[in-house]
Image (cartoon, rainbow, N blue to C red):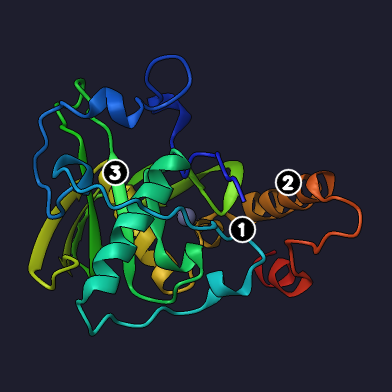
């Protein structure tokens, strides 16, 4: 399945005309705070697999993901695939449950922002937990599991995340602004929490109606509906 919608991406922060810079446009940017090594920069010719992104209504998105206990070759490969799937979908974050894997892993990548003096940052975090939160920000948020939907969402302005990398090494990563929003959104996914759960009651109703209408218009006759009635009831 091809899912080309960007993950939550505040439209006001779009660069260029209507998109984040493509990966190859930012490849030579200085990279800081990189707990994860990009295989494409190591001359590793292993091909990555693009994974199917699950849409709202898939029950896996409401499950709690399990702690990772084995930091093995499978995990390293899965991390690569998650990051590549996120990039292909032009997202800035993608959590394992969104590709049907109930493990506490997510990938992220935020582009360079000269105005904010921020370098491109990306990585794969395993068993992440937020150990510190500060401030508050409200801004548009979306999700690769809700293609095309953006709603105002209030989050902490900055967070500190404790995690492991795919090799099991301990990491402490700080995120501010956009990156903090990504971390909070993706860690929520690991607990079966979706961004619509953070919306005001009125916005959540609006979002559910928008999703139902969008879903119906996209469904081919006889296709399995994406939205389960129980999930709509639970979220409205
Ligand atoms: Zn999401």
> Residue 174: horizontal and vertical position, in percent?
14, 52
Q: Kindly identify the residue that appears in the image at 56 percent across and 57 percent down.
A: 196
Give the number of the disc on residue 210: 2
Distance in Å between CA atoms under marks 3 and 2: 28 Å
Spatial CA distance of label 1 from label 3 is 21 Å
Label 2 C-beta lies within 8 Å of the nearest ligand 1 atom: no
Q: Secondary structure at mark 2?
A: helix
> Could you tell me which residue is drawn at 28 percent across and 39 percent down?
110
Residue extending furthest toward the top: 17
Name the secondary structure under disc 1. loop
Asked if the residues shown at circle 1 and circle 3 are in contact, with their CB atoms under 8 angstroms apart, the answer is no
Q: Residue at x 62, y 51 (%)?
A: 1
Sequence-earlier tag: 1 or 2? 1
For mark 1, what is the residue? 55
At 39% from the left edge and 42% from the top edge, which residue is drawn?
Answer: 87
The residue mark sitting in front, 3 or 2, is 3
Which is more toward the observer, 75 or 236? 75
Between discs 1 and 3, the one toward the N terminus: 1
Point out residue 202 in the picture as x, y percentages from the top left corner.
Answer: 66, 52
Q: Quadrant of residue 57?
A: bottom right
Q: Looking at the image, can residue 216 be seen? A: yes
CA separation, marks 1 and 2? Answer: 14 Å
Could you classify mark 3 by the number of other residues whose Cα lies within 10 Å: few (under 14), some (14-19), or many (20 or more)? many
- Which label lies toward us, 1 or 2? 1
Residue 139: tell me if it is visible: no
Q: Quadrant of residue 35?
A: bottom left
Viewer-proximal residue among 93 and 192: 93
Image quadrant holding the C terminus, namely bottom right
Residue 108 locus on image (x, y percent)? 30, 50
Q: Is 68 positioned to the left or the right of 12 in the image? A: left
The residue identified by callout 3 is: 109
């Amino acid at each position: 399945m091809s899912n080309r919608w960007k993950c939550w991406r505040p439209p006001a922060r779009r660069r260029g005309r209507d998109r984040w810079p493509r990966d190859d446009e930012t490849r030579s940017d200085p990279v800081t705070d990189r707990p994860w090594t990009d295989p494409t920069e190591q001359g590793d010719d292993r091909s990555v697999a693009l994974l199917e992104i699950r849409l709202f209504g898939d029950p896996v998105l409401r499950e709690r993901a399990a702690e990772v206990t084995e930091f093995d070759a499978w995990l390293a490969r899965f991390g690569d695939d998650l990051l590549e799937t996120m990039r292909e979908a032009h997202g800035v974050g993608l959590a394992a449950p969104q590709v049907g894997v109930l493990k506490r892993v997510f990938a992220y990548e935020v582009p360079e922002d000269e105005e904010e003096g921020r370098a491109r940052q990306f990585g794969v975090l395993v068993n992440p937990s937020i150990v510190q939160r500060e401030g508050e920000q409200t801004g548009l948020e979306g999700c690769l599991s809700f293609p095309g939907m953006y709603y105002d969402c209030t989050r902490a302005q900055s967070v500190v995340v404790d995690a492991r990398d795919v090799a099991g090494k301990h990491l402490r990563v700080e995120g501010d602004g956009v990156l903090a929003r990504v971390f909070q959104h993706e860690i929520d996914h690991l607990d079966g929490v979706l961004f619509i759960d953070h919306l005001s009651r009125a916005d959540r109703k609006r979002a559910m109606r928008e999703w139902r209408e969008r879903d119906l218009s996209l469904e081919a006759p006889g296709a399995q509906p994406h939205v389960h009635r129980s999930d709509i009831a639970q979220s409205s």
